[in-house]
Amino acid sequence: MTTTVIVADEATARVFSSVSFRAKLNEIKLLTNDHDRELDRESLKELPIQTLSPKRESHSQEHEESQKHHSKHIFAQKVISYIEELYQKQCLGHLVIVAAAEFLGELRKATPAEIERNVILEMPEDLTKLNTEQIYQQLQVYYGR
């Protein structure tokens, strides 16, 4: 059975497919959190204002944290939306989710029940910077447990 593997953090999600959970991975999609990049550009524009007043800085930091959380939430929905498309096309198969711990929580919240039934493994690891072969090797370690 086909296996779909998501390797994600709050900025990037790489989606792989393989013919089985032990087979080599083929990257099929790269998703990026464009909203997060926009927030970074906006916060750089506001930087001089933030340094003028400690009260304003505190409020600004809280606002920035709130925006970043919202950005993670929106990106998790984007990733799961793509997975739902695969599910509807009957291309999903088993699902493996590898994500930085905090982002894994966001993905779990965004995942509908019919998709959850396909999840065979969740790994709270950030492997987004690894190449495909290194990700494959890490998965084999987890599969072997």
Image (cartoon, rainbow, N blue to C red):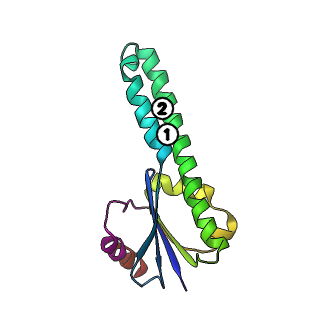
Q: Tell me the magenta residue range.
A: 125-137
Q: Which residue is disc 2 drawn over?
A: 64
Hey, what amino acid is under mark 1? Lys
Q: From the viewer's perspective, is residue 104 above or below residue 71? A: below
Pinpoint residue 110: horizontal percent, then vertical percent: 62, 56
Pinpoint residue 99: horizontal percent, then vertical percent: 45, 60
At label 2, counting other C-alpha atoms closer than 10 Å, the crowd grade (few under 14, some 14-19, many 20 or more) is some
Q: From the viewer's perspective, is residue 29 above or below residue 106? A: below
- Residue drawn at x 32%, y 60% is 129
Label annotation for residue 68: 1
Q: Could you tell me how far apart the alpha carbons at marks 1 and 2 are, in whole angstroms? A: 6 Å
Hey, what amino acid is under mark 2? Glu
Pinpoint residue 88: horizontal percent, then vertical percent: 67, 72
Q: Is residue 108 magenta?
A: no
Quadrant assignment for the C terminus: bottom left
- Residue drawn at x 63%, y 66% is 84
